[in-house]
Image (cartoon, helix red, strand yellow):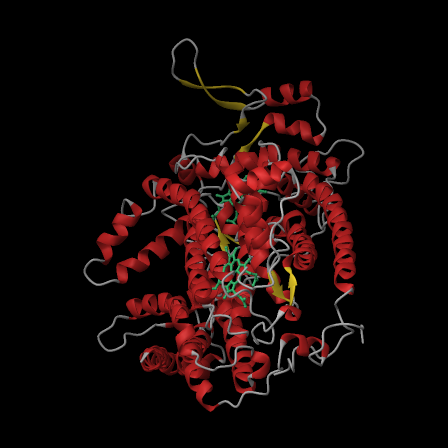
Amino acid sequence: MIRLFGISIGLVFAVAVLWAFANGVVSVAPVVSQYGSFTEPTAETVFHRHPKELHLQSDGPLGTWDYAQLQRGYQVYKEVCSACHSMKFLAFRDLEQLGYSPAQVKAEAATWQVPGVNPDTGEADMRPGTPIDSFPSPYPNKIAAAAANNNAVPPDLSLITKARHGGASYVYSLLTGFQPQPAALLKEFPDAKTPPGLHYNPYFANLNLAMAPPLTAEGQVAYGPGNPKPTINQMATDVAAFLTWTAEPKLQKRHQTGWPVLGFLLLATILAYLAKQQIWAAIKPKKTAATGSSDA
Amino acid sequence: MSFPWAREYQPTNGLMKFLDEKLPLPRLVYGAIGAGYPVPRNLSYMWNFGVLAGFCLVLQIVTGVVLAMHYAPNALVAFGTTEHIMRDVNWGWLMRYAHANGASFFFIVVYLHIFRGFFYSSYKAPREMIWLLGVVIFLLMMATAFMGYVLPWGQMSFWGAKVITGLFSAIPVVGEPIQVWLLGGFAPDDAALNRFFSLHFLLPFVIAGVVILHIWALHIPGSSNPTGVEIKDESDTVPFHPYYTAKDGFGLGVFLIAYCVMVFFLPNYLGHPDNYIEANPLATPAHIVPEWYFWPFYAILRSFTVDFFFVPAKLMGVLAMFSAILMWFFLPWLDRSPVRSGHYRPLFRKFFWFGLIPTMAVLFYCGGAPAIEPYVMLSQLATAYYFLHFLVVLPLVSSFEKPEPLPFSITESVLGSDKPALSGE
Ligand code: HEM
């Protein structure tokens, strides 16, 4: 009884889904015969690029921070990106982790203006930052942010490298990927012309974004003596490294905790294996075909 | 427990004698996972995953309780408190990564546990009740994991909650009211977040309760084994302790190594970047995908793209997705072959390795891919086979198949003859 019932239910689902499949074949067949692929090509599917390769010292299981680079990246963020992007999950005091002293952090925080309250009138006001304040947004609210940026709100950058496929490589590629729209694109997809106010960048999902190229000239940020030349590439790499840190300040600690933990587990597992072998030795025969044929 | 040769608990000192009289907890442990529980001597590592699943459950409860001390289920601050845990709470990053990856490893382990059951037909008599309780556990696990994923209130949390509760709106007439009732509103917000948090905290303890029943039911017939031949006498068994405590201990070590590699070096590999973007009801993500362990069932849901007679496509998909799991309840009565182990079932074995396993792989892959061709068509073929496998192939194969000869006993299968182990040859 149950089996008859089961077989009929199974057949119903199978027929229904194969019917959907048949419909799919009918609607896909013309697309395949016209374009040789399952979906109609669009400017995005043809011209979107995967992030370029970027190697940072924090990569891989042994990755550690390059503090000098993080400090340079902070400088780029402060002098360029912070004009539009907030970083709300980081407070100025977090900069101590990059090697600044508490006094330096206090002085640094004071160079920023953060939203506050006028102590005399009680009205909203700006005041100098203190170490416990977080990196502010330059805009009073989202509407103001969108109004100033072609209707796009510049995203908070604290977590940006974790919030995009490709992470730091993506940020680096985006910053160095602005270019004129290729002629081939316009020829193939005349409707896909970059709208006024947007900027062509093949690393962005839909190819056109509202951010104007923020890094445009060598030396835009003046690095102190002893640092590499601030080329566009170097600045983009440094800020990508910095944003890797902001997304996960505990990354280095995580790596450094992981190795001893793994070492201990490896040892414990070897001991557990030897203990198991010893316990089973008394009753375990030499390998015979224990369980019949296991091949299919 | 139920075997006459099972060793009896002997309290050795005054305290244990006292305890044994007043509250025989040591006796219970001795009989359940100690030397008083005889277990087939030939269990493979596929029988390790039950213990590992139990370990995962404890791990999730411990890390989860700590996370709950620092988390706040309020749409305004939920995302921020999760980041607070990652940045400011001592070892908070470890707790969160351990919990998120712990969920994934729990599912890996339970999937292996379930597929062990499929291959060795562990669901067959006399173990039906173990299996039924197992399916209940699996359903509870899915509900728990789904609600847990909503808590950090990222983009995938929000949109996942919206899509999954939206499935109920496919039910005719009462669907929409049910969705509003589940969410406490028209879209996920504070009401939904609060109740999901409450239930996400509660359900693991319900699971723990059902696990106790699961193991209780297991101890009545005892574990099956790779031959599927039942225990005949004492020489077929070894006491659980020290034999399987040692073997499971080694398995636990291997498990922990794999798990810690993920937690410490690839903690976001199994997650989705969009969940590091705070929930935004006005911005729909390009591709809404659930967590990886739901992908096969998500693929089944999305396979039903056209109406079937008077049943709308969406309703058909929802029915199929739920049936895909609920039908496991009927397996013990669908598969009537007298032989349990796939090792002795030539036809069944072919359908298992060349039918079910590739089907699951395709469903898994397509469930994580965007809902475009060719993924939809591939998942449609796989969905068709999935249902045919459990509901048509399994019942029919048992009628046509000629099983291979079984060993006379477990001991014979281990030693090649039915003599007790004397020499190691
Ligand atoms: C929290 C989740 C679970 C825990 C802690 C758990 C625990 C266990 C344990 C300790 C065993 C004995 C050891 C072993 O055979 O591996 C077992 C056996 C078993 N479990 Fe589970 N289990 C869980 C979920 C499930 C699920 C989801 C299913 C099926 C849908 C299932 C089906 C079975 C069956 C059929 C057996 C008997 C296997 C045999 O003896 O051949 N379990 N379980």
Where is residue B304? Give x, y as percent. 35, 72
Q: Residue at x 24, y 58 (%)?
A: B175
Please state which of residues B154 and A48 is positioned toward the viewer in this rendering: B154
In-image side of A59 versus B141 (left or right): right
Q: Residue at x 40, y 82 (%)?
A: B392
- Residue A171 in the image: state x and y as whole percent: 60, 48
Q: Position of residue B216 (x, y in %)?
A: 48, 57
In depth, the one of A249 and A140 nearer the eye is A249
Residue B16 visible? The answer is yes
Look at 26% across and 48% down and name the residue there: B181
Q: Is residue A105 above or below residue A44?
A: above
User: Is residue B42 left or right of A206 when viewed as pictured?
Assistant: right
Total marks shown come to: 0
In the image, farthest residue toward the top: A120
Q: Position of residue B231 (x, y in %)?
A: 58, 72
Q: Is residue B254 above or below residue A39?
A: above
Image-quadrant location for residue A64: top right
A16 vs A188, nearest the viewer: A16
Residue at screen point 54% across, 28% down: A134
Of A213 and A281, which appears nearest the observer?
A281
Decide: is A23 above or below B303.
Answer: below
**Quadrant where the C terminus of chain B lies?**
bottom right
Q: Is residue A178 visible?
A: no
Q: Residue furthest left?
A: B173
Q: Quadrant of residue B31?
A: bottom right
Q: Please state, as top left, top right, bottom left or bottom right, where the N terminus of chain B lies in the image.
A: bottom right
